[in-house]
Image: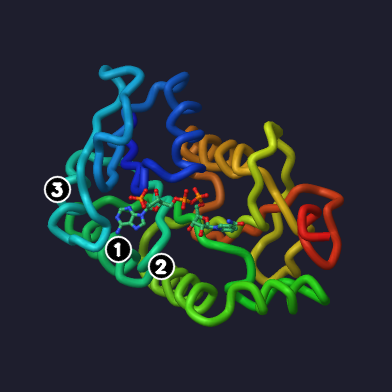
Amino acid sequence: MKQVLVLGAHGQIAQIVTKNLLAEDVQQKLFLRSSARLTVANPQKEKLIEGNALSLFDLQQAMEGVDIVYANLAGNVVESAKNVIAAMKAKGVKRLIWISTLGIYDEVPGEYGKWNHEQLDGGYLETYAEAAQLIEDSDLDYTIIRPAWLDNQDEVSYELTRKGEAFKGTEVSRKSIADLVTKIIGEPSLYVRESLGVNKPNTDGNKPAWYR
Ligand SMILES: NC(=O)c1ccc[n+]([C@@H]2O[C@H](COP(=O)([O-])OP(=O)(O)OC[C@H]3O[C@@H](n4cnc5c(N)ncnc54)[C@H](OP(=O)(O)O)[C@@H]3O)[C@@H](O)[C@H]2O)c1
């Protein structure tokens, strides 16, 4: 059975992915800090691992036997990316799905792009960009996912833009991002060494709807 390591398994998108994967032929290692916060629904298919992405040791231990790493991390994403890349290299794991954010290539056009910079500059956007660069400079089979501003709508509705294209739309549901991650885990040859913008169609504007 395919083995997936979910880094930041208590994260909001990660928890939706984890639920989705229970229906698939996949074994999950759920890596998180303070693991008592999560309950395993199916012990045959899920294993909790207490760990910190800032610890190379924790990551290397968790990587044993893993086919795909899905990183749903926040916080110090630069150090996390360095550790994830090093641990994958050490353990011979090649496939990485990395959740990033919109704007890391200055690819968000117009007023929305300006507003996005105002919200995210000053420590967030820069570090997410640096982490993505580290991953792109590695020889890993990565997919970087750049979601629009996230909401918790109970819907799956999204379209993709590639690196080099202008970002479309303003918002997207976490459930949509989880759907994309689940699809890639199901078919890991999809979007290898690609960086994908993800938005809900027809949501162009100067801000996400809830800010207008
Ligand atoms: N909000 C938006 O509109 C938006 C838009 C685009 C992209 N994003 C980004 O998309 C990503 C995923 O979104 P989300 O809503 O699922 O985020 P989330 O709920 O904040 O999940 C991120 C997870 O990262 C974990 N984490 C942080 N540092 C860690 C470490 N050192 N070791 C282990 N785990 C660590 C956190 O763990 P703890 O639970 O232990 O703190 C948390 O569970 C985030 O990076 C977010 O910034 C957000």
Is the N terminus in the top left, top right, bottom left or bottom right quadrant? top left
**Where's residue 137, x and y in %?**
40, 74
User: Looking at the image, is 133 positioned above or below residue 145?
Assistant: below
Amino acid carrying mark 2 in the image: Ile
Q: Quadrant of ligand 1?
A: bottom left
Q: Please identify the quarter of the rendering in which residue 49 is found.
A: top left
Mark 1 and mark 2 in contact? Answer it, CB < 8 Å. yes
- Mark 3 in CB contact with mark 2 (< 8 angstroms): no
Identify residue type, mark 3.
Gln
Tell me which residue sits at (45%, 36%) in the image: 15
Q: Nearer the viewer, mark 3 or mark 2?
A: 3
Cα distance in 3D space between marks 1 and 3: 14 Å
Q: Which mark is residue 85?
A: 1
Disc 2 element: helix
- Residue in front for this viewpoint, 98 or 35: 35
Query: Which corner quadrant holds the C terminus?
Result: bottom right
Instruction: Give x and y (percent) for residue 84.
Output: 29, 60
Query: Considering the numbered disc 3 on the image, is that residue within a helix, a strand or a loop?
Result: helix
- Type of the residue with mark 1: Ile
Q: Residues within 10 Å of mark 1 (few under 14, many from 20)?
A: many
The residue drawn where x is 24% and y is 43% is: 34
Which residue position is annotated with label 2? 135
Judge depth for marks 1 and 3 and give the one in front: 3
Residue at image coords 38%, 42%: 10
| Distance of label 1 from label 2 (alpha carbons) | 7 Å
For label 1, the SS is helix
The picture quadrant where one finds residue 79 is: bottom left
Number of the label disc, if any, that sits on residue 189: none
Residues at circles 1 and 3 in contact by the CB criterion of under 8 Å: no
Res 61 label: 3
Mark 1 or 2, nearer chain start: 1
State the image quarter where residue 169 is shown.
Answer: bottom right
